[in-house]
């Protein structure tokens, strides 16, 4: 079983979606958050590393809002099971982002608009889990 991270960046109530290029081994052409294999690293450290690598944002330009409970994701079409560690970060200031060579497009969408996109498996559930965790930490 593999482990990975999925990071959602949020700005002004919108969530960043990235569309994978053909360079991705799996799920190319689908929309997702910032993601990466865990490879034995600490999930939060890996999340920050992937934010920097995939968008060019520094640690100082993002704010961790929450880490949602990890979830099992069956990648039925690949015949594997994965553990995903979801995170939500806010991007307080509007910043120009860049995408790495593994992504071909990006857009900011409302959480309700996520369902209109062909995404990686269970992305909507991961986002809902993050948003629920974020609400539960409010005073």
Image: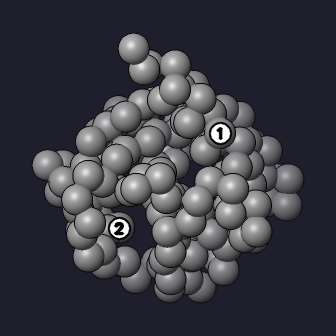
In the orientation shown, which residue stands out farthest toward the left?
60
Q: What residue sits right under mark 2 in the picture?
A: 54
Residue 19 lies left or right of residue 103; in this view the side is right
Give the quarter of the figure containing the N terminus.
Answer: top right
Q: Position of residue 96 (x, y in %)?
A: 26, 76
Q: In terms of secondary structure, where does tag 2 sit?
A: helix
Give the quarter of the figure containing the C terminus.
Answer: top left
Task: Give the residue at x 30% y 74%.
Answer: 97
Decide which of 116, 23 is in the foreground and name it: 116
Is residue 73 depicted above or below 55 in this figure?
Answer: above
Q: What residue sits right under mark 1 in the picture?
A: 128
Mark 1 or mark 2, which has the lower sequence index?
Answer: 2
Q: For mark 2, does the 10 Å Cα neighbourhood hold few (<14), some (14 to 19), or many (20 or more) residues?
A: some
Task: Give the residue at x 44% y 42%.
Answer: 88
Q: In terms of secondary structure, where does tag 1 sit?
A: helix
**Colouring convention used in this rendered image of the protein:** one colour
Task: Give the residue at x 50% y 75%.
Answer: 107
Quarter of the view holding residue 129: top right
Quarter of the view holding residue 38: top left
Quarter of the view holding residue 64: top left
Residue 118 lies left or right of residue 56; in this view the side is right
Decide which of 111, 80 is in the foreground and name it: 111
Q: Position of residue 73 (x, y in %)?
A: 73, 42
Query: Which is in the foreground here, disc 1 or disc 2?
Result: 1
Task: Give the residue at x 26% y 52%.
Answer: 92
Give how far apart the Cα atoms at labels 1 and 2 are.
22 Å
Q: For mark 1, does the 10 Å Cα neighbourhood hold few (<14), some (14 to 19), or many (20 or more) residues?
A: some
Is residue 40 depicted above or below 109 in this figure?
Answer: above
Decide which of 137, 32 is in the foreground and name it: 137
The answer to whether one can see residue 114 in this image is: yes
Does the residue at mark 1 contact the one at mark 2 (Cβ under 8 Å)? no
């Amino acid at each position: 079983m593999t482990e990975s991270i999925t990071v959602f960046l949020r700005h002004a109530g919108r969530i960043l979606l990235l569309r994978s290029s053909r360079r991705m081994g799996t799920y190319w052409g689908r929309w997702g958050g910032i993601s990466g294999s865990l490879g034995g690293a600490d999930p939060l450290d890996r999340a920050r590393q992937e934010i920097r690598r995939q968008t060019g944002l520094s640690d100082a330009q993002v704010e961790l809002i929450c880490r949602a409970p990890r979830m099992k994701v069956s990648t039925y079409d690949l015949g594997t099971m994965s553990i995903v560690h979801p995170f939500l970060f806010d991007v307080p200031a509007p910043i120009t982002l860049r995408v790495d060579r593994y992504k071909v497009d990006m857009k900011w969408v409302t959480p309700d608009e996520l369902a209109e996109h062909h995404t990686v498996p269970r992305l909507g559930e991961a986002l809902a889990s993050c948003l629920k965790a974020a609400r539960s930490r409010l005073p």
